[in-house]
Amino acid sequence: MYDKIRNDISQQYYTENYPNEGQRFVAWYLRNIHNLDTIEAKDCITDGAGDKQIDAVYIDNDSSIVYIIQGKFYSGDTVDATPLREVLASWVEIKNLSKLQEDANEKLRVKINELATALEDDYEVVFELITTAGLTESAKADLATFQKELSEDDSLSANLVLVDNEMLKFKYDEALNKNRPYINHEFKVDPGKCMEIEIGGTKAVVAAIPLKECIKIPGIKDGSLFRKNVRQSLGTNNKVNKGIASTLKKDAEGFFFYHNGITAICSQITLKDDLLSVKELNVVNGCQSLSTIYSCSEAVRNTNDGYVMFRFYEISDPEKADKISTSTNSQSAVKARDLRSNDKFVLAMKKAYEQCYTDGYFITKRGETADPAKYNTNHVVSLTELGKQLIAWHSQRPTISYSETKIFDKYFDQIFRKEYAPEKVQALNELSKCVSAKWVNDNPMGLNESLLAMKAYAPHHHLYTISMFFCEVNKMPESVPNPAIAYELLKKNELLDTIVDMAGQCLNMAFETASSETVESGKIFSPQNWIKAKASLKDIRGAVKNQLSALKFTPGGKTIVEQIEKGLKMENTDFENRWTAD
């Protein structure tokens, strides 16, 4: 991997944006493993003087995880425990964020602000030590000690993940979606605790596998057993994994009854006497459980009555294997959004939309797709995206749009407990697509790079800003315009592109003004914290007002303002009260 990465980071993007191989290596990891784009990756880098042993901070709002990354780009085969001690030092520093911020460099200070906000929202913390070498034996022992210290510390929920050369290669191969690794294994099964069946032409084996047999399965430690799993182990301090570990240590005999079981796919299954042989084994549901069982090996090694249920499927068809993997993984991580997919108000909205747009489809469940040969892609909407749009437009709180948990849990009743016209759903869909088209790396609106780095959630502020133009023009600052009427006016008067661009400019202006004022006052400006704070909404309203006023005094600007005021004119009855969300 060292030679591969060294060749990759010699490319122009890396040499022009990062001064040394260490930073380029971390940027490569962010791009290729965490799948960030060039702008997002650069925004995460904190390496340099005053980095306090923290090379990058990546806050994944979708998964509610903060990744604190330390990179060591070595050409040798092994590395001692020095990098581990650096990670441990950063862990100690992070436990006192105010002190850490005093001596940190400018980029890290910004990330500390964002980290503090994330911790308030109960985000998990994952320390990733990435290296192109492997650990020495003594360093491996230190790693186990450090991982134990982190898991037992109640003051900061965190875990340490080593991504060494072996794991790095696996993660890179997985990111490229290469074929699943070949793991062949034999399980020792007890008589009467294993059953072979055939369903729909597919061989399946359901077995109660002894816990002490599980720790012998290859591929748990390096993650290669979980090629098709949604994500790798979250460590033993994760809330669910802590519960699994507690049961293993206190009631291993009851584990079989408390656990849902593990699903695995194989290319061949052979059951003979007390041996179950499998080829090309892949666990598609059970990564957290097996990883925790492996980490509790001493507790289960001598357990004679502890079992876990396995479902083995013999699959030769890759497409069928992928379908099983996708279905199982989609069902394994139940989120607030999933629990709402069958809510009667959601189903009523879906029915109304699909009756109005007979060639359309309303996606309510994760993993669902709309066949483009069957449906008009312009009339395909998603419950997830609609929730974000509704809270940005009708609740006027784009500051919350990044959080699916808040939308579909805390604020669900305020958003979905009412009838909502299909035309409004489609209008928000169309407006959002126009906005999204502007948030690309080519940066057609000339956005500040720090703002563009937040494209996962800042576009909802852009949508909100569009609504503010209607509020300002019609002198209805405390109300919300009907999105269907607003969209039709924009199209009818050929103002759609104009207002979308002007709204983007206002958002950018508000962002840069807030940044300048904060820095001038001697404080630290955090882009992510600004985008999540209600103060950003006041800044945006002010930017819209200022832009319309300033246009009147520019050559030709007065005519443009007149066109906008005429084209965006609405009746008072076309506005409604804001939906309360905080």
Image (cartoon, grey):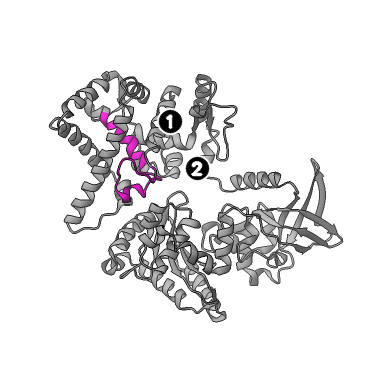
Write the start and end of the magenta stretch as one range.
Answer: 440-469
For image coordinates 52% across by 59% down, the residue present is 238
Q: Which mark is residue 519?
A: none
Q: Amino acid at mark 2?
A: Ala
Amino acid found under the numbered disc labelled 1: Asn
Q: Residue furthest right?
A: 273
**Relative image position of residue 354 (x, y in whole percent):** 53, 23
Q: Quadrant of residue 566?
A: top left
Q: Provide the secondary structure element on which disc 2 rests.
A: helix
User: Along the horizontal axis of the image, is 546 left or right of 274?
Assistant: left
Q: Residue furthest bottom?
A: 138
Q: Is residue 353 above or below residue 121?
A: above
| 315 inside magenta stretch | no
In this picture, residue 17 sits left or right of residue 235: left
In front: mark 1 or mark 2?
A: 1
Whichever of callouts 1 and 2 sits on the residue coming sooner in the sequence is 2
Residue drawn at (40%, 26%) of the image: 427
Tell me, yes or no, whether the highlighted magenta stretch contains residue 453: yes
Res. 336 mark: 2
On screen, 397 above or below 353?
Answer: below
**Rendering quarter of residue 223:** bottom right
At 45% across and 44% down in the image, what residue appears?
405
Q: What quarter of the picture does the N terminus occupy?
A: bottom right
Disc ID at residue 429: 1
Q: Residues within 10 Å of mark 2 (few under 14, many from 20)?
A: some
Disc 1 to disc 2, C-alpha distance = 22 Å
For the C terminus, the quadrant is top left
Q: Nearer the viewer, residue 396 or 165?
A: 165
Q: Nearer the viewer, residue 392 or 580?
A: 392
Q: Is residue 387 visible?
A: yes
- Secondary-structure class at tag 1: helix
